[in-house]
Image (cartoon, rainbow, N blue to C red):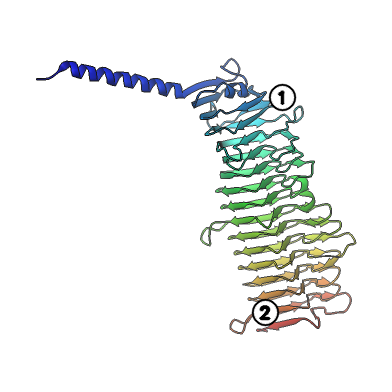
Amino acid sequence: MIDCKFFRGQKRLMLLVFIALLSMGMQAQTSYTLGTGKDYTDLATAINACTAAGTYNLTVYDNTVTLGAKATVKAGVIINVASDVANTQRTITRTSNSGYIEVKTASAELNITDIKFDGDSANYSCSYSMFAVGTASISSTLTMTRCTIEHCRNTASLGGGCLYVYEAGTATLNDVTITRIRTSVTGGGIYNEGSITTNGTLDINHLFGNGSGNGVGFYNIGTITCEGPVSITYNNGSQASGFFNSGTIYFKAGATITNHFAGREAGGLYNTSTGTIIVGIDDTHPADLNVSFDTVGGSYGRGGIKNYGYIMVYGKTIIKGNYTNKSFAEAAGLYNSGGTIICKGETDISDNIANASGFLEEGGGIFNTSGGSITFEGTVTINNNAMLYGSGGGIYNSGSVINFEKEVTLNNNYSSSWGGGIYNKAGVINFKGDVTINGNSGGGGGGIYNDSLINVGTDINPANLVLEKDTARTNYGGGIYNSSKGTLICFGN
């Protein structure tokens, strides 16, 4: 016999469960509209109204929406902010000095798509980053897709004019542009202690730092993985106007760090002793590093790259047109002190000028010192570099090692003192391929000044050394000046 009452009871139970689940789902997916005549006209007000755990969808319908106060994404809350038209940015404008967004509570998540944030720097300055993510111990997440942050002015004592990612925070930036920011802090564009992943293009440009902080464009002591290309250009500040790194960075699709001005230290890229920078993925997936046209206008200038840590470039390395000025101006192109640099593709270090303004300093193109190691595995061009007040127009190597695995050309480099092409002091330079040193000029040793050890080729793989049209203005060694302590061994011709 079939008990119909039993089945009717089961149906009622299933219906009640379905209604309850539906109700829960509706509560977890709440939608609001933003814009003139919509649910909200201010983003902070809308975000602060999302109090219960769940997912909230905020759609921006026009360019009248404001950010007029501090907005906090609550614990367990997921907020999606998006333009009403895909691939079309809607603008949200800061309208007070306290307009910023915190994603710093447990399991909080903020996802922003197709939005432009205008900080209105002409009228407002904020003592906080536009976005702050995580804390030292609380994990939260920010994802931005096809977004722009512009015209912010930050007066904070902490870093991050636009974005501050704390130790436990995570940010994902997909096709994001940060531009025209004024800041007095370290990390004017981005300050990262946690984890950042970028996809598509990350473009940071035209930031101005008027304080003493490092890394006007980007300051990193955490981990950054850039899946797409990175462009950091036209930033101006006190030190390391392009990029300052003490953490780990993966530029998987390459990086362009150009056209910066810094008051001192590195104009383009500063990598400390704890910093690791990998450009490309491996030999079969290379990517290029371009650090060019960066200027240091004050003392202790190292124009393009200043490195104390580890740098690996799987693709081409370009260091061109960098300039340093005033006292202690060393290595307008590449400065390496105790660090390790490996360039696996072609390298071009050209047109760099170090002007020490009356102080005798070293290294127009390359300065390698304090036990540093540089290895070039591809062909190398070192042309038209100059040390206007010092030695080593092309290369200055002191107490360190430089390895050239393939052909090298040093043409038309200049120094006011010794070593127009190469100055080697208490160091080792190994040329494993042919070397052409042509048209260089120095006070002495126009092509090479050597008081240590230079090897050209090996007994198994000989290489040739060609010196042409090199000049010494003091009549000591137009091609080569080899001191009493120097040894030059050529296994070829």
Left or right: where 77 falls relative to 301: left
Q: Which residue is mark 1?
A: 96
Q: Position of residue 273 (x, y in %)?
A: 68, 58
On residue 129, the disc is none
Left or right: where 234 falls relative to 58: right
Around disc 2, counting alpha carbons within 10 Å, would you say few (fewer than 14), some (14 to 19), or many (20 or more)?
many
Q: Position of residue 249 (x, y in %)?
A: 60, 52
Q: Position of residue 322 (x, y in %)?
A: 76, 56
Q: Position of residue 283 (x, y in %)?
A: 53, 62
Identity of the residue drawn at 63% across and 44% down: 193
Mark 2 secondary-structure assignment? strand
Can you name the residue that lies furthest to the front here?
137
- In the rendered image, the vertical position of residue 210 relative to residue 406, given as above or below: above
| Residue in the foreground of this view, choosing between 26 and 481 | 26
| Residue in the foreground of this view, choosing between 68 and 62 | 68
Quarter occupied by residue 451: bottom right
Quarter occupied by residue 381: bottom right
Left or right: where 214 falls relative to 168: right
Q: Which residue is mark 2?
A: 456
